Amino acid sequence: MKDLIRSLYIALIVASLTPLLLPAQTASDILRFSNTSPQGTARAIGIGGAIGGLGGDFTSLSVNPAGIGGYWKSEFMVSPVFVRNNTRSSLNGGLESQELARKFGLSNVGIVFTNTSDRGAWKAVSLGIGLNKLGNYEQEFFYQNETQGSIVDRFAGRAFGLTPDQLDGFESGPAYSSGAIYDIGNDLIYETDFDNQDQEVFQKRQLVKSEGYNNELVIGFGGNLKNKVLIGGSVGIPFVSYSSEKSYEEIDDLDVIPAFNYLNFNEYLTTEGGGVNLKLGAIFKLNNNFRLGAAFHSPTYLALTDRFTTDFTYEYNEGAGDESFTNESPEGEFEYGLTTPWKAVANAAWIIGKSGFISTDIEYIDYSSAKYDFTTNSDNVEDRIYQDEVNAEIKESYKAAVNIKLGGELAYEGFRFRLGGQLVGSPFVDDNSFEKVLTAGIGVRGNKAFLDLGFSHSSVNELYLPYQIEGAPLQNVENRIGKNNIVLTVGFKI
């Protein structure tokens, strides 16, 4: 009876695990590349990103490309950015730890060629090419606490029913070779040093680092029709680079688990690729003061490649002295496709003469329409089954969300003062909360050049699970993340 109960328990563990696709792309991972917000110039940052209805700013090519029709002179600009993200982490209610991630990068670089005419219906036509940042992945966090359970139970679950030479090379295989799991009865039910120790607590800790970017090369064309309508379109070519390092440890300094001393499981992942999308838009000048606009963003199709490795160290003492073994995985690689959601954008702007403006953008984005394609370069039946399972989970877990952006600018002679904010809707079903973003900026405008400085701040809470096993104690890591961006734009009229 005891063996039967144990077998049923392990079967539940196995049922909760992802298949042997490493790293296993999940429904939550798709948000990394779907939840984008163009940063671009410091002017756009300073007014909360509500640039779509104004025109005359390069960021608009990634929001409402009709904005390129608002140019009257050719222009070149470059926008370096400093990112500072602060994460406070707590494991199962333990003491908070704080880590900082800092990075210099490029938020925008672009050039616009404009041709104006006093004759004909088209008062100005412009061609723009450059780069806008859509997102960054800088984060570092650390947590530690004494909790129940062990990641070794996950490895035993993955090994259930398999012979040692059938074990995967990234988790259960290294765990077996290091002595963390073993099969005493040769019944393909793997034992661990943590069996029957469910109530014991011992230290867990992990350091997680991630970095990377989602930059969009954008090529746009548009014009000013009779000074009444701005029309434009752009082709976006996003380039994605993401990497993460995770170092997970379990330590039994008080010897509450017989034989076990220490383990260390490291995971390394890089994701790289590119894609393409199309944006179309129009801005209508109702009079000299009011403008209304609309834009549609097609889904972005990304072709991505994951490269990944792991290594595992296990230390134990069976009475004959301490033993320590380390095993490394092979280098894994997986190519797949990903389609992000489509987006619709409505814009409105009130131009207050030469004193400034107030502008707003409202975005509608259907996260449930995102999907994976694991069969692009694979005819594996398990890949197709897992693809269908994850895409079904995306439809069940996510919904359409609305993002609201509002900002304004006050002009005094050659100086500009800006404030803005965003309410970013949650993509999760049954979650109606909003992430709040606050922005500010200043600028100096001249006939030949301009200089702008923009700042944005947001805070968000997220739940991180280092591992998960059905029926086993959860390791809930609560992260409170503060995101800060400082953007400086230098531009020249040419």
Image (cartoon, rainbow, N blue to C red):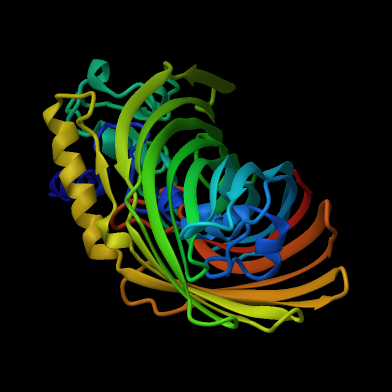
Residue drawn at (29%, 32%) of the image? 21
> Where is residue 112 shown, x and y percent of the image?
62, 44
Q: Nearer the viewer, residue 315 or 196?
A: 315
Residue drawn at (20%, 24%) of the image? 378
Compared across the picture, whether 400 is left or right of 33 comes to: left
Residue drawn at (45%, 22%) of the image? 178
Q: Nearer the viewer, residue 57 or 198?
A: 57
Q: Is residue 12 visible?
A: no
Compared across the picture, whether 425 is left or right of 437 comes to: left
> Where is residue 161 shown, x and y percent of the image?
17, 31
> Where is residue 315 shown, x and y percent of the image?
55, 28
Q: Is residue 334 above or below residue 390?
A: above
Residue drawn at (50%, 30%) of the image? 270
Q: Quadrant of residue 70?
A: bottom right
Q: How many marks?
A: 0
Q: Quadrant of residue 89?
A: bottom right
> Where is residue 276 shown, x and y percent of the image?
38, 39
Q: Nearer the viewer, residue 362 or 185?
A: 362
Compared across the picture, whether 391 is left or right of 401 comes to: left
Compared across the picture, whether 72 is left or right of 402 comes to: right
Find the residue positioned furthest to the front.
119
Q: Is residue 29 above or below residue 326?
A: below
Q: Is residue 254 above or below residue 445?
A: above
Q: Nearer the viewer, residue 251 or 74?
A: 74
Considering the image in quadrants, where does the C terminus appear? top right
Q: Is residue 73 visible?
A: yes
